[in-house]
């Protein structure tokens, strides 16, 4: 395969237009590789800002970028919209839901993960995740629909209560934003509602928030949420989610008009159907170079890969590990196509951060520097603006953020899209 690939450039099929998949495409631009990017959506979604779409702080187009625009920026790449259903390992072909078949010399599986409901009864039926753009819009529709109904018919049974399940970065960002939305706009935009009935409850089964963050940053996040009026319930599991309530493991019942499920992610079920070896959370087991042990032409990246960090633990399912894996895979494909051998993947920790709300965030940077408050918030804003794809998207997000900051408690929430 290597000799044939050297002569005409290898056919590289990348499944998934997330952070990992795009990093592979970008990394192969200066090579002879003929790259085909496949995704079920014709756009890339900037997942870290989906919670702001869900709360009407941003519009859907602000966090989505056309996949075809990305692949046409150089190299020999193309895009095809489609959903992977199977892989013919012997023939080296991927099979799509539209019955199409695409041959490859190298295959990169980077179709990400999906919501993990942890086996909780009713969670999938009644809890709303915010993992995709459609998810975020569904949360937005439910939330503002509930406010309109409560304004028209009253709220006596917890219709104005939002329960956020999960105390990771997504959970605290969602809870903090909801609390600020309640404080800044509810009384003004919905004068018939009793703002005191609007509750934001965050439920976390651990005894702390933000697993993976230093203790000092966890304490700050808890304090910042409490100052915003979020009811944080630590050490509480969810036993059942109903249409109008959440039942905790302790037996406590919380009437709720909306349940946002941010308790974690798991590998897409397709990973199991492909017959790949799976590790914790259903993630696909890979070798040190991110290849499948029995399929040396197949790499796995991003949330889907059970890659290990320097401490021997699985890497977190975040953007930075996905980007680094994608870049590494691109480099290995280039080496293999030239007759070389692969190198092991080494993750470089760039730090972690999360925002609780306006002028409140936590960050641990490379080297262990810890930031909180306004400084961390500005760092969070800057990082997300820089990494967001597209100049138009950056300008739109910057203008939205500037307006929300300058017109605090006066600016309106414009509901566009969904």
Image: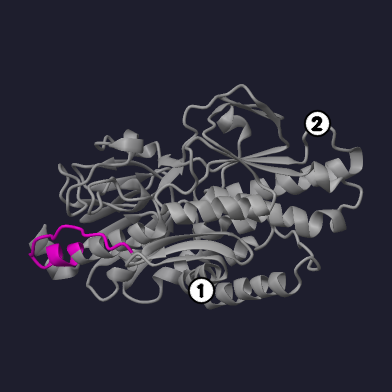
Residue plotted at (29% across, 46% down): 314
Would you say residue 45 sits in the magenta stretch?
no
**Do the residues under discs 2 and 1 have CB atoms within 8 angstroms?**
no
Q: Which mark is residue 157?
A: 2
Is 418 placed above or below 401 here?
A: above
In the rendering, at what x and y percent does residue 362 appear?
Answer: 50, 61
Residue interval drawn in magenta: 332-349
Is 142 placed above or below 243 here?
A: below
Say whether disc 2 or disc 1 marks the residue closer to the N-terminus: 2
Few, some or many C-alpha atoms within 10 Å of disc 2 (few <14, some 14-19, many ≥20)? some
Q: Which residue is mark 1?
A: 382
Q: Which is more toward the observer, 348 or 86?
A: 348
Q: Which mark is residue 32?
A: none
Count of numbered labels shown in the rendering:
2
Residue plotted at (53% across, 78% down): 391
In the rendering, at what x and y percent does residue 241 appear?
Answer: 61, 28
The alpha-carbon separation of the residues under discs 2 and 1 comes to: 41 Å
Q: Is residue 112 visible?
A: yes
Q: Is residue 132 visible?
A: no
Q: Is residue 330 left or right of residue 74?
A: left
Q: Which is more toward the observer, 152 or 71?
A: 152
Q: Is residue 9 left or right of residue 197?
A: left
Q: Is residue 83 left or right of residue 331?
A: right
Few, some or many C-alpha atoms within 10 Å of disc 1 (few <14, some 14-19, many ≥20)? few
Would you say residue 343 sits in the magenta stretch?
yes
Dividing the picture into quadrants, the one containing residue 294 is top left
């Amino acid at each position: 395969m290597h000799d044939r690939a050297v002569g005409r450039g290898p056919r590289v099929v990348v499944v998934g237009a997330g952070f990992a998949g795009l990093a592979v495409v970008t990394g192969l631009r200066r090579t002879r590789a003929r790259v085909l990017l496949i995704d079920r959506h014709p756009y890339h979604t900037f997942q870290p800002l989906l919670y702001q779409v869900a709360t009407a702080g941003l519009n859907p187009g602000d966090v989505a970028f056309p996949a075809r625009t990305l692949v046409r920026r150089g190299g020999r790449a193309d895009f095809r919209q489609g959903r992977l259903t199977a892989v013919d390992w012997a023939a080296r072909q991927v099979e799509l839901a539209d019955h199409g078949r695409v041959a490859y010399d190298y295959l990169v599986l980077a179709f990400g993960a999906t919501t993990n409901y942890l086996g909780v009864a009713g969670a999938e039926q009644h809890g709303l995740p915010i993992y995709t753009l459609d998810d975020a819009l569904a949360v937005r529709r439910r939330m503002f629909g509930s406010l309109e109904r409560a304004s028209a018919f009253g709220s006596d049974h917890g219709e104005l209560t939002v329960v956020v399940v999960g105390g990771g970065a997504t959970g605290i960002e969602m809870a903090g934003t909801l609390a600020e939305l309640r404080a800044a706009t509810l009384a003004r935009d919905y004068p018939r509602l009793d703002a005191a009935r609007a509750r934001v409850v965050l439920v976390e089964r651990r005894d702390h928030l933000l697993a993976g963050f230093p203790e000092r940053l966890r304490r700050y996040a808890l304090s910042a949420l409490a100052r915003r009026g979020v009811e944080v319930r630590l050490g509480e599991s969810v036993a059942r989610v109903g249409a109008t309530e959440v039942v905790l493991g302790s037996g406590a019942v919380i009437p709720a008009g909306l349940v946002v499920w941010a308790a974690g992610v798991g590998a897409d079920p397709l990973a199991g159907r492909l017959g790949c070896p799976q590790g914790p959370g259903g993630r696909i087991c890979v070798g040190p170079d991110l290849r499948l042990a029995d399929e040396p032409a197949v790499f796995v990246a991003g949330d889907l890969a059970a890659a290990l960090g320097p401490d021997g633990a699985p890497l977190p399912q975040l953007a930075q590990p996905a980007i680094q894996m994608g870049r590494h895979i691109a480099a290995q494909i280039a080496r293999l196509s030239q007759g070389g051998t692969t190198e092991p993947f080494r993750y470089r920790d760039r730090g972690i951060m999360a925002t609780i709300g306006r002028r409140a965030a936590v960050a641990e940077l490379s080297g262990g520097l810890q930031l909180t408050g306004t400084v961390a918030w500005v760092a969070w804003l800057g990082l997300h603006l820089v990494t967001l794809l597209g100049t138009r998207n950056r300008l739109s997000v910057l203008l939205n953020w500037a307006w929300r900051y300058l017109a605090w408690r006066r600016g309106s929430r414009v509901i566009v899209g969904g």
